[in-house]
Amino acid sequence: MSASPLPVFIAGADLSHLCWLEAAGAVYRCDGRAGDPFAICRARGLNLVRLRLYTGDDALAAADPFNCAPVLAQLLPLARRARAAGLRVLLDLHYSDHWADPAHQDAPAMWAGLSGAALEAALEEWNRALFARLIVEDLLPAMVQVGNEITNGMIWPYGRIDGDQPPQWDALAGLLRAAVRGIRAACGAATPPLCLHLDRGGDWAATERFIDRLDARGVPWDILGQSYYPFWHGTPQDLSHCLTASAERWRKPVLVAEYACHHLPCLAEKSAGIAESAGEQAARLQEIVAVVRAVPRGLGLGVIWWGAEYLPVGHPADDRLNARSCFAADGEALPVLAALGAAARAS
């Protein structure tokens, strides 16, 4: 089998916590009618869903679903629902039992104490077995993200980057090459495009430094994914500069793999002067789509909304999640979904 081809322009949403939220009572609506959120996204014009995967087991995910789910047993039905709705899947591999981001990249319990060749071998085999299973399930993704926001490395402490020390970069590069070997061992010629994901959408200097160091160490990659949040990562002009410079330097597609702003007031994240309303949320998304479309050589691959699925059920009292959602508190699809879908239809 082979992975589904990527859309001309990706209009995507991360819906990774659906199993947990639906179990807690979340109901999603489109024009007042309850429906499957994957189908709602497709009806609004989206063409891809991003699903993360943790390395823990079912017991860990059940005990702490906010921090440790989804694991494979939850990912598989989500991926099937996405496919049934006509959505391609970007598989986001968190090489950790919980959230992986620039501040958290803890090694999974199953790899505790491993380093060097032993850790690389374990990582290679985990990826090989995972993708062999996905092939058996006929769920090979359209793209695979090899790590999540790995600006400071992954699988700490061995793979941590905290400066410009060559041995640390050697260790991280060895881990990434091992992960790719495992994916390719299972998939062969059907290997999906490989995405490296940073959290530096508005920071060209850090992006250049990171990718150049991995390129010098032979790390394979096809797509550069960036997180860009207006309350953390600078202005849209900063994003434009970083994406444009990346496309010009490496001649590879660039993707805003995570983006969100607010439709509700959010004390924890003030939206960089953006008015917090449903209409403004959609308008700001259109601005980011325009930035990505303007990337030279047609290398602006698309935009994926992070946290599209959150509703005020089940999760900790944190207004950031509900404020970023693409659904109102009653589950009704917000205008930002249609704005995102329109970006795909315009391709």
Image: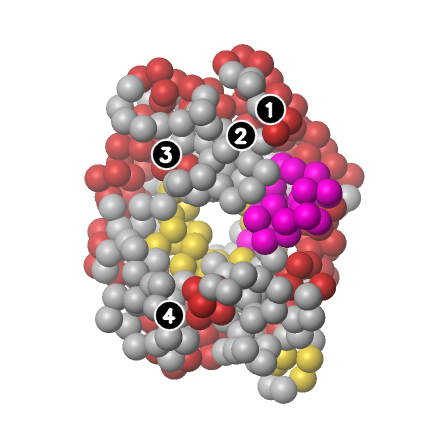
Q: Which of the two discs, 3 and 4, labels the residue nearer the N terminus? A: 3
Check if mark 3's residue and mark 4's residue have beta carbons within 8 Å: no
Q: In the rendered view, would you say 239 is above or below 342?
A: above
Which one is closest to the eye, mark 2 or mark 3? 2
The structure residue drawn at horizontal position 47% and vertical position 59%, both measured from the top left corner, is 306
Rounded to the nearest whole Å, what is the CA distance between mark 2 and mark 4? 32 Å
Q: Is 207 on the left or on the right of 112, as rendered?
A: left
How packed mark 1 is, by other alpha carbons closer than 10 Å (few <14, some 14-19, many 20 or more), is: some
Give, as a three-letter code, the residue at label 2: Ala
Where disc 2 sits, the SS reads loop
Is residue 16 something that shows in the picture? yes
Q: Which of the two discs, 1 and 3, labels the residue nearer the N terminus? A: 1
Residue 220 location, quadrant: top left
Q: x%, y% of residue 105?
A: 47, 35
Give, as a three-letter code, the residue at label 1: Trp
Give the quarter of the figure containing the N terminus. Answer: top right
Q: Which segment did they paint magenta?
A: 47-72
- Label 3 sits on residue: 152
- Label 2 sits on residue: 107
Rounded to the nearest whole Å, what is the CA distance between mark 2 and mark 3? 13 Å
How packed mark 3 is, by other alpha carbons closer than 10 Å (few <14, some 14-19, many 20 or more), is: many
Where disc 4 sits, the SS reads loop
